[in-house]
């Protein structure tokens, strides 16, 4: 029997679709370094785990659709650290930042409406957009320019009467770019001029390096009725499996619209919201330490990549990903080779082909996204494998 044409049009996630091959390599006894996915090896803060162990309700009951009251009351203080003034009613707790993206697209857009994204972009947005019948239009940010914001006129050219929003991610997955105050201002001026929304995925706000400043789009108060922020506890407190995120906006109509979706899915996970509340007590020292660790890994990875013949990458300012250009014509084929046909000292690595992070299917074919979520020793081994694999692959081509 046929499935929907909608589901047939989805791409399998470029981050996860090679997993069966990695599983097969593991079955053969090969150690796989997973640099394809943003699953940090950083320990979750202990008080988060204690909160889960201490959950002592007699019933794990449904909670409020908009999220646990105590958590929503506590979040404004967290945002205040970033000069964002919001009230609990501006915050909806979601099942991960993923659900906040879905809710936002479903709330703002009708089928065939358009959202403009700079590419490469967070690839799962593509699936959420397809699910909502939303068409993504892209403006290409350039490897050579460190993936900074393309000229604002490029965005303007893409706007038509179907356009509802521009969506960005800062610090960026997959490029590591952090949009500057001036770039945000340009985008905000444009969305105001053309009466659009600006959706900003800020889930990596804690991960900024070299003193690069993170500026939340919500600090531009003059525009705050058209700004929607997607947020998540996943990366900040290394609690990806807890599935807690939030949608934050001062536009009450958006919250009132999204609540209908929230009610339909009943509530976000309850035990995990208890954990999220505890996570907000995490000392700044934890965040600083984690930041320092990622910066070290980034420096190491960038240095290593630049010593491999034909490989190039730009220096990411934040998040924990980078896009690397490889001396291969088809990075997807090379990623497959790494898992199916290669091992060095019984080890290999898994990377995400970057082509799937572009809306324009002709782009990113020689690029991979690398997540520097492993410790330096593992990164060193993974880079050694990459170096040897590229040599071996060349002789096959
Ligand atoms: C940019 C970005 N946004 C949102 C998410 C979704 O995060 P979660 O659903 O785990 O909160 C991710 C996960 O990797 C991400 O990288």
Image (cartoon, helix red, strand yellow):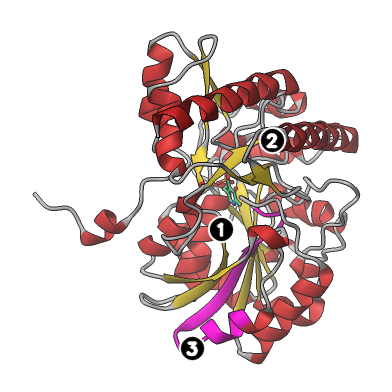
List x then y, in percent, for residue 281: 82, 37
CB at disc 1 and ligand 1 closer than 8 Å: no
Q: Is residue 80 left or right of residue 227?
A: right
Point out the tag, 2 or 3, that comes first from the N-terminus: 3
**Label number found at residue 305:** 2
List x then y, in percent, for residue 89: 68, 65
Residue at 81% over, 51% down: 78
The residue singled out by tag 1 in the image is: 121
Residue at 44% over, 28% down: 395
Point out the tag, 2 or 1, that comes first from the N-terminus: 1
Q: Is residue 173 visible?
A: yes
CB at disc 3 and ligand 1 closer than 8 Å: no
For the C terminus, give its image quadrant. Answer: top left
Task: Report the residue that reaches farthest toward the front.
Answer: 395
Residue 150: image quadrant is bottom right
Work out how far the residue at label 2 is from the one at label 1, CA to CA, in angstroms: 22 Å
């Amino acid at each position: 029997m046929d499935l929907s044409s909608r589901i047939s049009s989805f791409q399998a996630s470029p981050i996860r679709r090679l997993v069966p091959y990695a599983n097969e390599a593991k079955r053969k006894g090969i150690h796989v370094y997973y640099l394809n996915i943003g699953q940090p090896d950083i320990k979750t803060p202990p008080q988060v785990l204690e909160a889960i162990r201490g959950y002592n309700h007699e019933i794990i009951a449904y909670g409020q659709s908009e999220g646990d009251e105590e958590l929503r009351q506590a979040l404004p203080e967290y945002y205040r650290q970033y000069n964002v003034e919001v009230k609990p009613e501006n915050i909806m707790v979601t099942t991960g930042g993923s659900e906040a993206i879905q809710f936002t697209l479903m709330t703002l857009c009708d089928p065939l409406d358009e959202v403009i994204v700079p590419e490469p972009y967070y690839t799962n947005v593509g699936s959420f957009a397809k699910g909502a019948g939303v068409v993504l239009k892209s403006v290409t940010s350039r490897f050579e320019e460190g993936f900074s914001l393309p000229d604002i006129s490029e965005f303007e050219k893409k706007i038509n009467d179907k356009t509802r929003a521009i969506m960005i991610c800062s610090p960026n997955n997959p490029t590591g770019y952090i949009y500057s105050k001036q770039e945000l201002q340009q985008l905000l001026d444009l969305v105001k001029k053309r009466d659009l929304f600006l959706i900003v995925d800020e889930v990596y706000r804690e991960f900024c390096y070299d003193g690069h400043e993170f500026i939340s789009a919500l600090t531009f108060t003059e525009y705050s009725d058209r700004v929607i922020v997607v947020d998540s506890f996943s990366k900040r407190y290394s609690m990806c499996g807890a599935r807690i995120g939030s949608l934050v906006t001062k536009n009450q109509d958006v919250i009132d619209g999204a609540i209908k979706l929230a009610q339909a899915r009943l509530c976000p996970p309850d035990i995990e919201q208890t954990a999220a509340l505890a996570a907000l007590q995490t000392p700044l020292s934890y965040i600083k330490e984690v930041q320092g660790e990622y910066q070290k890994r980034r420096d190491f990875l960038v240095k290593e990549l630049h010593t491999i013949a034909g490989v190039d990458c730009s220096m990411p300012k934040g998040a924990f990903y980078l896009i690397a250009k490889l001396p291969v014509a088809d990075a997807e084929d090379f990623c497959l080779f790494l898992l199916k046909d290669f091992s060095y000292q019984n080890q290999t690595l898994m990377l995400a082909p970057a082509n799937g992070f572009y809306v324009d299917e002709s782009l990113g074919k020689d690029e991979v996204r690398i997540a520097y979520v492993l410790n330096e020793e593992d990164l060193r081994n993974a880079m050694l494998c990459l170096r040897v694999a590229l040599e071996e692959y060349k002789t096959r081509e």
